Image: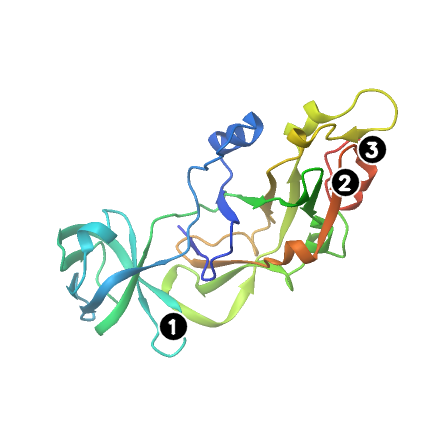
Amino acid sequence: MPLPVQTKTLSGIVFAKYTPANINIIESLSLPQVFTDVIKPVSLAAGKISVTEDGYDVYGVGTQFKTDFNYGDYIYYYNTQTLSPILLGQVNSVLTNTQITLENPSAVTITNGYAGSANTVLSTNDDILMQVPVVFNSPTQACLPNWNQWRNPNTITSFNNSATNKIERISAVDDPTLIISTPENIPYTIDALTDAWSSYRATGGVPAYFATPSELPKYVYALLKIYGNASTNLAPNSLFKIFASASFTNNCVLVNLGVGGADLYAAGYNNVDR
């Protein structure tokens, strides 16, 4: 099973699995909208770890394993040159605050290395939800992401623009501990989710949205759908990295009350009336 790793934390942007429970959260329009199955970045664990090649036991100094890890979590060590997290293995048991056993033997020897943890795994069939907080210029004007700037060539049906957002396979296939020198780009489509806006559409005349300030969305959502061909699908038991630009405020569409559906469509909101 591949493990997505987001090494750069983005302010306010959340990634999660595309699940029925999360879709219900979006469509309910309730706040706060807290996803389940969130895809989290690798977080730094306390202390330092040591393990020997082919060994099952990870020992710590100054560690808090019982706080930082649970059964089934993934434990990482950090490359001392690049400071990138590299998968060490999966936790079988947390014996004490200074000793963990792994599901499989370690492929490397580490002495007093920094450790990190993560616990979200994608299957080869999983797609990804993205939640972006809306930036408000005033109570009646919001800045919504221009999704077409994330597509190449700037059209609703095209794939992601890897210059601004991408998913990369960074390990060898079926070996998440072996980091490859040239990551594989995994193409995906971006589907802006606007189903919940249907109740905010004005009736009659030219389609328009958001009659009152309370109807302006606090978040916008997109489905990142992995291109389902055998050569580019998520490889099992491999390590992936999610990257997304945080420059939405510099690359957005300004929306006022009563914005036309055609204007939203031009910014990549493909499920609006226009």
The reply, left or right, for residue 129 in relation to residue 217 is left
The residue type indicated by label 2 comes to Leu
Work out which quarter of the rendered image holds the C terminus and state it: top right
Q: Look at 66% across and 42% down and name the residue there.
A: 191
**Is disc 2 surrounded by few (<14), some (14 to 19) or many (20+) residues within 10 Å?**
many
Q: Look at 47% across and 30% down and name the residue there.
A: 21
Q: Look at 37% across and 57% down and name the residue there.
A: 42
The reply, left or right, for residue 169 in relation to residue 164 is left
Name the mark on residue 259.
none
- Work out whether residue 186 can be spotted: yes
Counting from the top left corner in percent of width and height, residue 260 is at 82, 35
The residue labelled by disc 3 is 274
Q: Look at 41% across and 69% down and name the residue there.
A: 179
Q: How many numbered marks are there? A: 3
Q: Which residue is situated farthest in the bottom direction here?
A: 81
Q: Are marks 3 and 2 in contact (CB under 8 Å)?
A: yes
Name the mark on residue 264.
2
**Is disc 3 surrounded by few (<14), some (14 to 19) or many (20+) residues within 10 Å?**
some
- Work out whether residue 195 can be spotted: no
The residue labelled by disc 1 is 83
Q: Earlier in the sequence, mark 3 or mark 1?
A: 1
Q: Earlier in the sequence, mark 3 or mark 2?
A: 2
Q: Are marks 3 and 1 in contact (CB under 8 Å)?
A: no
- Quote the CA–CA distance across marks 3 and 1: 48 Å
**Mark 2: which secondary structure?**
helix
The image quarter containing residue 64 is bottom left
Counting from the top left corner in percent of width and height, residue 3 is at 41, 53
Residue nearer the viewer, 73 or 48: 48
- Quote the CA–CA distance across marks 2 and 1: 41 Å
The image quarter containing residue 173 is bottom left
